[in-house]
Amino acid sequence: MTAAIEVRDLVVERGKRRVLNSISTTVPRGSVTGLLGPSGSGKTTLMRAIVGVQIVRSGSVLVLGQPAGAAALRRKVGYLTQAPSVYDDLTVRENARYFAALYGYGATAADAAIRDVGLADAAGQLVASLSGGQRSRASLACALLGEPELLILDEPTVGQDPVLRAELWDRFHALAAAGTTLLVSSHVMDEAGRCDRLILIREGAIIADDSPADVRAAAGTTDLEEAFLRLIQEREEAVATPGDRAGSTAVANERQTP
Amino acid sequence: MSARILAATTRRILTQLRHDRRTIALLVVMPTALLTLIYYMYQNLPAPPGAPRPFDRIALVVLGLFPFTIMFLVTSIAMLRERTSGTLERLLTTPLNKLDLLFGYGIAFGLAAAVQAAIASAVAYWVFGLDTAGPLGLVILIAVTNAVLGVALGLFCSAFARTEFQAVQFMPVVVIPQSLLCGLFVARDQMAGWLQGLSRALPLTYAVEALQEVGAHTDATGRMWRDLAIVAGAVIVTLVLAAATLRRRSG
Ligand SMILES: Nc1ncnc2c1ncn2[C@@H]1O[C@H](COP(=O)(O)OP(=O)(O)OP(=O)(O)O)[C@@H](O)[C@H]1O
Ligand SMILES: [Mg+2]
């Protein structure tokens, strides 16, 4: 079976800046892949390219075996934008039912998605009157609808309390166990540890693309946060002295995962 | 396009409107208030011999102009909100077809305009004694077609606005020249030749002419149907142009 996502030599320019600089990576099906990196490193841009709403300069993005953005993919790929994108002047339930209808699902699927994100009590509330974290979850509910084959979630747990975060991650793993592929961006390192694979990008280039255990081993530390700092440092040194890449086995921009 | 998605989108837009009570109140009350104003403005103006009362002439055209203007404004703001809130980008990643969205707006606001036009016409006819040779139903039909033209132009123009401030500035650009040249203020055949030519290129002119035909003739005239067809054609062309402004991919 083809990979869920196959990115080859992707170059994206936004404004006059090169935001993604020849990125290549492969995301296998049925896994939870974490997309991590400093603010402004290009996570959202990469996700936009994968759902097919980003104009790309060159390179290719294959999603479930088809070019990103292909019409047939639109019912198979769920996308959560970083900023909540739901209608302020509709209730949570009305929002969920509308997005459910777009995918051909009824009220039951909509209500289930609302329950999944813990918003059942606020289902009748206008989105405009929700708290920030509730609003993000309302937006998440609309992305989870109908259990798509591929879920692209841009910072789905930001602004949520630890209990809810744990519940949402359990939900993500349950979805992956059932065959869904998830690509989840995050800033929180304890979430990185919950992923099957990690992609770390910095300034539009991939600096690590491995399982959390391998990332830890490559960086020689058990702490993921520390591991990322070291990888970023190594990368900077490698750039400063080209040719000297000692110890950077996880510097994986040039290594392809089959 | 899909009937299911179109219906869901229309319902969603109407639900948003339903939650906004004040906008509904304004949609209902404003035309009545304006007609009242016009009625008293022209109350003491004598009718020229053999011609309709000035109020009849003005009110008939206003019945068509009002839904056009309001629906243009409402739609351009609603569509701009879809763009700035990220919901448009999200919608374009779903199975929704661009035309589902555009027609959804056309139908939803067209229905709102029908209600508005019906109430305004009822007031004009039964409170202020508006008198037309042709039937009320045709007046409402033309008003609603005209409102849908406003919706289509609003959908199109919203693509060129980044902010609400910019969007409202399109109102004078789109509405005022068409209103000035449509024959309401100066009869079209009394305008300079180049203005007549310009007037003939603007769709509102045909909507107003159609209304005047209903005002003057008992039965629907061929010219009225032709005018109405031209307005409907302008709606289609504008919707196609608006669809071209909805890009799935952006920078
Ligand atoms: N519309 C745009 N036009 C020009 N540049 C943009 C645009 N959107 C983003 N950028 C730039 O592209 C770069 C990558 O942005 P992106 O949103 O992908 O970052 P990110 O990794 O998602 O950051 P964060 O963690 O803060 O969400 C940033 O430097 C940003 O300033
Ligand atoms: Mg981002």
Image: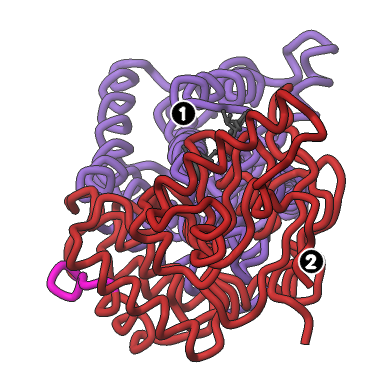
Chain colours: A red, B purple
Q: Residue at x 13, y 72 (%)?
A: A121
Tag 1 and tag 2 share a subunit: no
A146 or A237: nearer the eye? A237
Residue A118 magenta-drawn?
yes
Q: Which of the numbered marks, if any, corresponds to residue B44?
A: none
* C-alpha span from label 1 to label 2: 61 Å
Reading the image, the residue beneath label 1 is B58
Q: Amino acid at mark 2?
A: Leu
Against B143, is B184 above or below?
above
| Residue B159 quadrant | top right
A140 or B130: nearer the eye? A140
Residue B12 point in image, percent of width and height: 41, 65
Q: Nearer the viewer, mark 1 or mark 2?
A: 2
Against A49, is A140 above or below?
below
| Secondary structure under the numbered disc 2 in the rendered image | strand
> Can residue B6 be seen from the camera position used here?
no
Left or right: A112 as drawn, with respect to B136:
left
Q: Is mark 1 within 8 Å of ligand 1?
A: no
Q: Residue at x 29, y 22 (%)?
A: B43
Is disc 2 surrounded by few (<14), some (14 to 19) or many (20+) residues within 10 Å?
many
B145 or B136: nearer the eye? B145
> Can residue B53 be seen from the camera position used here?
yes
Reading the image, the residue beneath label 2 is A62
From which residue to which does the magenta span run? A117-123
Residue A257 point in image, percent of width and height: 75, 67
Q: Residue at x 77, y 59 (%)?
A: A7
Q: Is mark 2 within 8 Å of ligand 1?
A: no
Left or right: B83 as drawn, with respect to B149:
left
Specify the subunit that label 1 lies on.
B
* Quadrant (top left/top right/bottom left/bottom right) for the N terminus of chain B: bottom right
